[in-house]
Amino acid sequence: MPSSKKGASRRKSEAILKRLDRAVANSVRALYYPIVVKEAHDCTVTDVDGNSYLDFNASWTVAGAGYSNPEVGKAVKAEIDRNFGIAAGTFPGELTARFAEKLIELTPGKFEKKVWFGHSGSDACDAPFKMLPPATKRPRVLSFFGSMHGVDVGGMAMAGHPATSKYPIPTLATKVPYAYCYRCPFGLEFPSCGIYCAGDFIEDHVFKYVNPPEDTSFVMVEPIQSDSGDIMPPPGYLEKLKQTCDKYGILFVVDEVKVGFGRTGKMFATELSKNVIPDGVSLGKSIASGIPVGAFVARKNLIDSGFALSTLSGNPVGAAAGLATIDYIERKGLPGNAARVGAHLLKLLKEMMSHYELIGDVRGRGLIIGVEFVRDRKTREPAKMETVKIVYRAWQLGLLTVFVGADSNVIEITPPLTITKEAVERGAAIIEQAIKDVEAGLVPDSLVARYTGF
């Protein structure tokens, strides 16, 4: 059980953080509170000072099967003893074939597929950007405001997040509004809007004036947008978007890097929609429990040509981790646990809304939940500083969470899929206490000045 509290010793953490400040580039750090981790197991993280925390983040969903999963660790250690350092692209092994076959079996669609392997969700999102325009002989791409597809050039070109938009990357990617119903850019309401953003707007305006459909290779979409605020599109959104793509022969690619492998209660979030079969799926994060692996699973004819090889693509250690992770998720029924426990947590958080005006919206599915904070429910002015403070105060009280969103005003909740009902109740109680303490002025601005996330 978490044992951290305000006033706990953090001297070792502070000393190491000073060393990190001197030695590690800020561009690869996203800080929310002054923590330095010593070890992590299942849903608990312990810092170097001995303080333990309940984890509501899973290291950005990487630890879907729980931190330091012993079964995954055993598989990785065994493969390291056999095949450490093998470049599978030239010297392949049977394990890589098994891993690819498993991903082909799991991902939606019964057509002929193949797997491209990389090292992260970033390069798994970059892969379609590299391979699909040449394959289709169409140079353009359609993506979405608020999207986050990693930090490789292709992913950044397609992204619509403030963290990446400042980089001047020449591209033929056009961004359009996502179905952010709480802040609809068109001022419409669902369902009377007819999901305007996924059909008429694209056809009547984007295709007509900006992005000719005959030049558009593929659409890249997140079934649930995560880094822009855990945005749940309305029922029928993906279906209508897929229909628009099919009408013009445009490929439909989904980014399941953060929401895949059971997090939403289904193995893949795309499966929450009816009859939506993507042409390609980008995977990463929880695919291998922290061993660097990315994968793009797509129609065979789309990714067989070209050159997109990295030295350690599909290496046996990553394959061992991936197979063990998937096996654990399936045997332990983690998608079902995510559905049950997530629904309970969502209910608790929605009940909290009636007591705290700061909470403007609560949304999610399974164990990906966003709590959006506003200063005024009518104007929906983002409560950025209050959100930063709530996350910081929750850390002081023994809970690890983060804030996301274009305005940094959404607390993202993505715990390991192994978490229990009792644990999420403790976590929800900590969030509520943190809100109370921030409203009471117990967290000064100066305390959180450097903790701005990414």
Image (tube, rainbow, N blue to C red):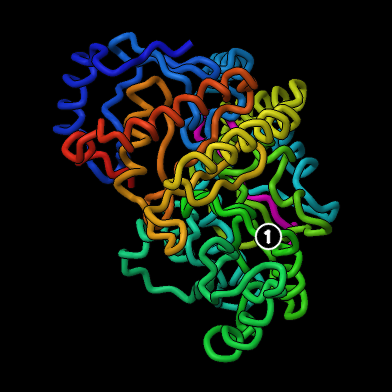
Q: Is residue 413 above or below residue 108?
A: above
Place of residue 120 in the rendered image (x, y in percent of width and height, measured from the top left)? 50, 42
Q: Nearer the viewer, residue 359 or 411?
A: 359
Give residue 363's position: percent from left, percent from top.
Answer: 59, 47
Kindly identify the residue that appears in the image at 55 percent across and 58 percent down. Answer: 307
Q: Provide residue 49's location: percent of width, then percent of height.
A: 28, 11
438 versus 157 height, above or below: above
Given the current orientation, which residue lies at the most extreme bottom position? 209
What's under tag 1, amino acid-wise?
Pro
**Image quadrant where residue 79 sits:** top right
In this orientation, does residue 225 appear? yes
Give the labeled residue for mark 1.
234
SS assignment at label 1: loop
Q: Is residue 292 magenta?
A: yes
Left or right side of 103 for 433: left
Q: Nearer the viewer, residue 356 or 229?
A: 356
Can residue 82 be seen by looking at this rendering?
A: no
Q: Examine the image and state in which quarter residue 17 appears.
A: top left
User: For the magenta stretch, what is the residue range?
Assistant: 287-302
Question: Does the magenta segment cover residue 299?
Answer: yes
